[in-house]
Image (cartoon, rainbow, N blue to C red):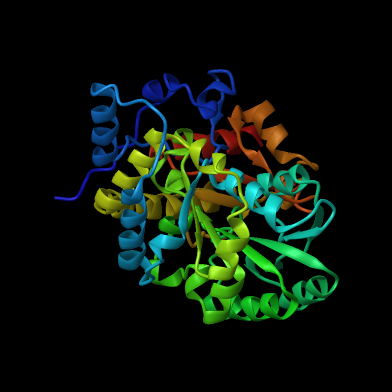
Amino acid sequence: MADEVRALSLDQLRKRKSVKWRQFPDDVLPLPVAEMDFASAPAIKAALLDMVERSDTGYLGPFPELFDAFAKFSTQRWGWQPDIKQMRIATDVGVGIVELMRVLIKPGEKVMLNSPVYENIWRWITEVAATTVDTPLIEEDLNYKLDLVAIEKEYKNGVKIHILCHPHNPVGVIFDKQQLAALAELAKRYQVVILSDEIHAPLSYDAKSFTPFLAVSDLAKEVGIIITSASKSFNLAGLKCALIITQSSALQERINKMPLAVTWRASLFGAVASTAAYAQSSDWLDQLLITLDENRKLVADLIQSKLPGVKYQIPDFGYLAWLDMSNLGLGEDPAAKILEKGKVALNGGVLYGPKHKNFVRLNFGTSSELITEGINRIAKSL
């Protein structure tokens, strides 16, 4: 029997100590932060309880079982078997990418992103004193793809690193294998390293539609590094554990300059929970995707009936809805207006790029009741 995915009640959620439930007053329904409102997968919960019961709360050391678990998970999910000898642990995806940039480039060198994109990617580039090069995605009716012509132009102009958000948050798209293969060819030609943030990958509704960047082509193996984590798909962000994966001995050698502390600052609990996620919780993940599939369609139905002026493209993965509010006349910060009048917290589009002020991002990784309540509040506030 598959593991049940159970949405928690609002009363239960109000007792949580995570930022999502502490950032706003109790009269606000929080739907911004990318964490889910479901009970943990049973195997993860059991693994963590076992650690606590044995008072096993020390430092993280060698943890090969995590690499084995991810390799098997990846093979089963995407038909890609990574080399466990080219895996290492990092504190989280953000720390992993920052530390990779520290050893791959010098301050002032150029790093590319593709807006609208996850807000912290902008901050990571600033953190290492690099120069941000924004090459926006091509958009047509909320369908997005990489602008390979513009990307090549900027690669020619000296970009050293390209942080690829794959699958892409917040727009909800999975780049196809052909686009990614073409990107790898450009990266090889212009000696660009692609850091592929694949944190949302296990949340692809059709697993076959997602191809890990290192599985795209032989060239992708030469130019790419994957940084990923179980945190988004199994709700483990607070446990601090991620993976850095190469498939090139040359790139592996280059990143060996990272300090040992990149691994040691990760959490023992995070490694244990991530291992239980990848090795024992695939049934739970499959059930979660059924629930989220229902939720992404519910959002579409509610928007059509309650907010017909809002544009929404059902996402290819995950639990994040990218909503175009430009037809509603809410000004340059619709999220602020909705928070003030409707008591619903959303992320404003400006976080993801300066040209997206009329957008908001809504988290539907919760119960159908809270999704309905949130959209009803938005509709009434307008």
Who's the residue at 71% across and 33% down the image? 337
| Camera-side residue of 275 and 282 | 275
Question: Can residue 301 be seen from the camera position used here?
Answer: yes
Q: Residue lying farthest left?
A: 1
Residue 368 percent across, percent down from the top left? 39, 41
Residue 317 percent across, percent down from the top left? 47, 58
| Camera-side residue of 115 and 277 | 277
Residue 39 percent across, percent down from the top left? 32, 34
Who's the residue at 49% across and 54% down the image? 200
Who's the residue at 42% across and 38% down the image? 236
The total number of labels drawn is 0
Left or right: 81, with 142 as reference point = left
**Where's the C terminus, which quadrant?**
top right
| Camera-side residue of 364 and 113 | 113
Residue 60 occupies quadrant: top left
Who's the residue at 42% across and 19% down the image? 15
| Camera-side residue of 90 and 163 | 90
Residue 363 percent across, percent down from the top left? 52, 43
Question: Can residue 205 be seen from the camera position used here?
Answer: no
Left or right: 41, with 17 as reference point = left
Left or right: 164, with 357 as reference point = left
Residue 137 occupies quadrant: bottom right
Q: Is the residue 272 above or below the residue 138 in the image? A: above
